Amino acid sequence: MAVAQDYANVLDAGYGTIPASPAATLMTGAFGLGIMAVFFVLIVAVVVLKGFALWRAARNGHKGWFVAMLVINLMGILEIIYLLTAGKTVPPPGPVATPKSPVPQS
C-alpha cells in the first residue's frame, strides 16, 4: 500500500509524466501530414495494382497466381512480378474454322 501511495504522490508532483515517443513527434505538424499523404498515395497505388493484377489473373485463368495474390500481401511486389512475367494477356480464342461441306450439284 505504501508503494501505491508513493507512486500517487510522484504523479501528483508532476514527475510522472511520460515524454512523447519520437514517432509521435514526427507525426505532428506539417511533416506528419506529408508522411500521411505519402502513405495514402502508396496505399491507393497498391490497391489499384492489386486489383489490376487480380483481374488479369482471373481473366487468364491463372488460379494459383490469383489465390497467391489475394492471400499474400507484399505491398505490390508479387503483383508486379506477376504482371511482368506470367501476366501477359492471353489473346481470346478466335472463331473456329469449320470445314465447309460440299454443296450438292444438281
Image: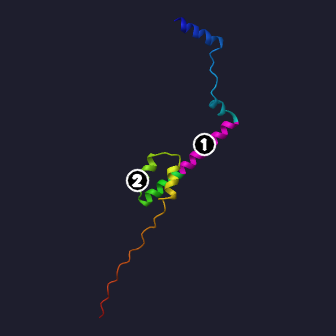
Magenta-span inclusion, residue 40: yes
What residue did someone put label 2 on? 64
> Residues in magenta?
30-48
The residue lying furthest to the bottom in this view is 106
Q: Closer to the observer: label 2 or label 1? A: 2
What residue did someone put label 1 on? 39
**Image position, residue 94 (x, y; %):** 42, 72
**In the image, residue 13 above or below residue 99:** above
Determine whether label 2 and label 1 are within 8 Å by CB.
no
Q: Residue at x 41, y 74 (%)?
A: 95
Residue 82 is left or right of residue 95, and the answer is: right
Q: Residue at x 47, y 53 (%)?
A: 54
**Image position, residue 84 (x, y; %):** 52, 58
What's the residue type where badge 1 is placed? Phe
Q: CA distance from mark 2 to mark 1?
A: 29 Å
What's the residue type where badge 2 is placed? Gly
Question: Mark 2 vs mark 1: which is more N-terminal?
Answer: 1
